[in-house]
Amino acid sequence: MPAPNAPKQAVPRIVGVDVARGLALLGMFSVHVFGAFDEAGSPTPAWMFAGGRSSATFAVTAGIGLAFTTGGRRPVTGRPAAVAVAARAGVIALIGLLLGYASRAADLDVDVILAFYALLFLIAVPLLGLGPRTLAGLSLSLAVGAPFAVHALRGVLPEPAFDGDPTLQDVLTDPLGLVSDLLVHGDYPVLAWTAYLCAGLALGRLDLASREIAPRLLGGGLALVAGTWLVSSLVLFRYGGLRHLWRAEFPGASRAEALWDSPDGETWWALLSRAPHATTPFDMLLTLGSAAAILGGALLLTRSTRLTRVLMPLAAAGSMPLTLYAAHVLLLATGALSGTPELLYAVMTTGALLFALSWRQLGRGPLETVVASAARRCREAVTPPRPPEPVADPARLSRHTE
């Protein structure tokens, strides 16, 4: 086992993980292009199939990537590893806060996720040395318990003074509001979303190349989704939970909105919702199960050489999610093709896949290179130099050879 402050060892890329991340990326694109509800007030197909699930899968695969960069199955901890993770978090936060200017200027309804990711990475530092079972248990505990804490703290922590995505200016003018937004008030409350990161870290500490892992992830994920959906359906429809949720959180709204829109959290009845981004136990467990099933399915598909070749554009996109995510926010901010969402989505996805497939020949994505370089430099700066190798005494060596 490597020493706590040893440099990390490279973990080979697993194509199935990149495919799962690529699917999550395209799903997030669809939600941002088509929105949650159509003009008739019905949920869009993008929202029903990708809403919440894509961003959760994105967060889980981010945790897997973090596990890979800190040793994989043999975690590397200590000060150099912690500093490297903090450097990654700092660069990702900077990119997210800069994208906030574009998002605000265009009045986008995107909710840039990168600042939340940065805080998640910082929270992950003390978790890097934990084993997969401990991390999995922590993930499930947070998925069930953290939504209650988020709901309670929303009435305690101040709401941010800024409107929209945070920017660099808000770090100085409203630091407390920014922190409370990242922890509980935002669309990706870190207090609860740590569950996804823990799940990703747990998976990244396993041998994902093993033939046993993929079917277990697929079957276990589908079982968690089915079981949670069944229990939530009983609570909502058989025992009247939807009626209470509707009256308390969605007065005057349609039944579809009460079922599919995330509540504001004005009452404790909001915790019965299973809508995307509701940050309730039902929502968290459903999306955790979906992420596991998507990853398991991707790992199974990429066992076939032929299917791997077919899925290579998707894997290429999944290997540079930061670059493509930032690019899609900037494209949306231009307002181009906003009147034709189908065409916009086709251009966005095709462009992302072609760019990723072409750029992959050069290595990491542009922004991924910046993040990795900053992490490497910071890690090297605090890594103590290795002691010099002892030099053999020539006289003693000659006596042994006579």
Image (tube, rainbow, N blue to C red):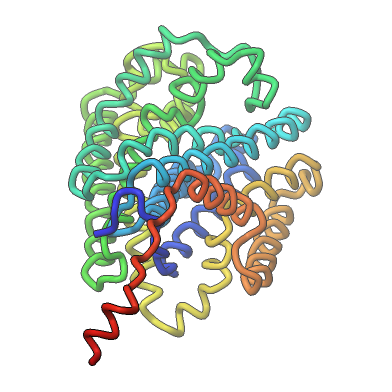
Q: Position of residue 223 (x, y in %)?
A: 22, 52
Q: Is residue 399 left or right of residue 332?
A: left
Outermost residue, bottom side: 402
Q: Is residue 259 above or below residue 47?
A: above
Quadrant into which the N terminus falls: bottom left
Q: Is residue 204 above or below residue 187?
A: below
Identify which residue, 326 or 249, lies in the foreground: 326
For the point 74% across and 44% down, which residue is it?
330
- Occupied quadrant, residue 260: top left
Q: Is residue 298 left or right of residue 54?
A: left
Q: Position of residue 210 (x, y in %)?
A: 26, 71
Q: Is residue 382 left or right of residue 342?
A: left
For the point 31% across and 79% down, which residue is it?
395
Q: Position of residue 118 (x, y in %)?
A: 51, 36
Q: Is residue 21 above or below residue 153?
A: below
Residue 36 can be seen in this image: no
Q: Position of residue 263 (x, y in %)?
A: 44, 22
Identify which residue, 22 or 344, lies in the foreground: 22
For the point 28% across and 47% down, which residue is it?
225
Residue 194 can be seen in this image: yes
For the point 61% across and 68% down, which residue is it?
363
- Occupied quadrant, residue 20: bottom left
- Occupied quadrant, residue 246: top left
Label tally = 0
Quadrant into which the C terminus falls: bottom left
